[in-house]
Amino acid sequence: VVSTQSGHYGRGAFCDDKVQQIIDLKRELVGDSDKGFVVVNQKGVDPNSLDALAREGIVALRRAKRRNMERIVLACGGTAVNCFDELKPEQLGHAGLFYEHVLGDDKYSFIEECDNPQSVTILIKGPNKHTITQIKDAVRDGLRAVKNAIEDQMVVPGAGAFEIAIYQALQEYKNEVRGKQRLGVQAYADAMLIIPKCLAQNGGHDAQECLVKMLQEYKGVDKCVGLDLETGEAMYPAEAGIWDNYCVKKQLLNSATVISSNLLIVDEVMRAGMSSLKG
């Protein structure tokens, strides 16, 4: 696979010379074997050059987008060259299979069976645009979750188990607090139960009943307890392989606390302003 970033091939001796350079390189590397040879150009290729390359069994793709050129280099290896004087065998990439396929009204080129691809393309099909958008969002969320887990090098139990554990920890911490601060600790603990409640409601279960089951189960065992959306019963997410990203939970706690504090400050400012007007 050769990736070039040169301009439009002009007609005449100059064009024929450049085409011949590609043909000579192909003959030198491939010879009479059945191996294919593909040239990808970011600009245009005139019909005469396409015919000359095709007679030698060379496929030329023209007007490739810049981002696709970068992805081809990552997938197949090699480097993109700006002129034919830089074209050397060690700069070529490799792919086991190249073919064109028609999807709908558009024709796509597929490059597969790369040795060590650093870039891949996920093909999404659907009956309508709305379905494709939903699938695309789900794939993007899944890839982002995997990326976060790799970067964090840690995960936390999912299915609402993280929030249940925080709730129980805050209930124990509340006994060490005196005064009206106890109300703040209790409010923060109750806020942690919003996510388990939403999970239960989305699963079609009674939220209060599910919370009671999880809290009772958590007190009896030394494990994180979550919610089974299929049955509405308590379950152990670590054993079921249900995990959440550490950075997501960390950002959730930080953002919720900061936003709540800012809202309380606004309320205090408004209350102070109303008091001054009455005075």
Image (tube, helix red, strand yellow):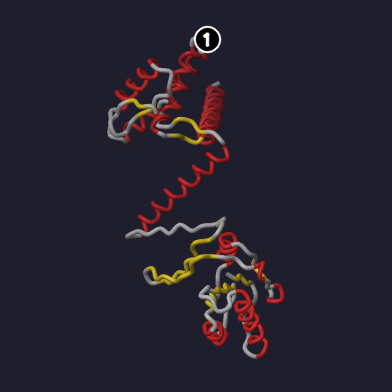
Side of 201 relative to 145 (left or right): left
Residue occupying the far front of the picture: 32
Q: Secondary structure at mark 1?
A: loop
- Count of number-bearing discs: 1
Residue 61: % across, % down: 53, 75
Q: Residue at x 34, y 60 (%)?
A: 128
Q: Nearer the viewer, residue 54 or 200?
A: 54
Q: Which residue is mark 1?
A: 176
Picture layout, residue 149 above or below residue 274:
below
Identity of the amino acid at label 1?
Answer: Glu
| Residue 120 vs residue 216, the one in the foreground | 120
The residue under the point 63% across, 64% down is: 78
What residue do we see at 52% from left, 14% from top? 181
**x and y percent of residue 224 in the render?**
43, 24
Quadrant of the rendered image containing residue 159: top left
Q: Residue furthest bottom?
A: 12
Image quarter of the C terminus: top right
Residue 189 position (above or below residue 44):
above
Task: Find the residue positioned furthest to the right.
Answer: 85
Which residue does the image show at 32% across and 25% down from the upper left? 210
Residue 101 higher or lower than 209, as above or below = below
- Quadrant occupied by the N terminus: bottom right
Q: Position of residue 114 (x, y in %)?
A: 53, 61
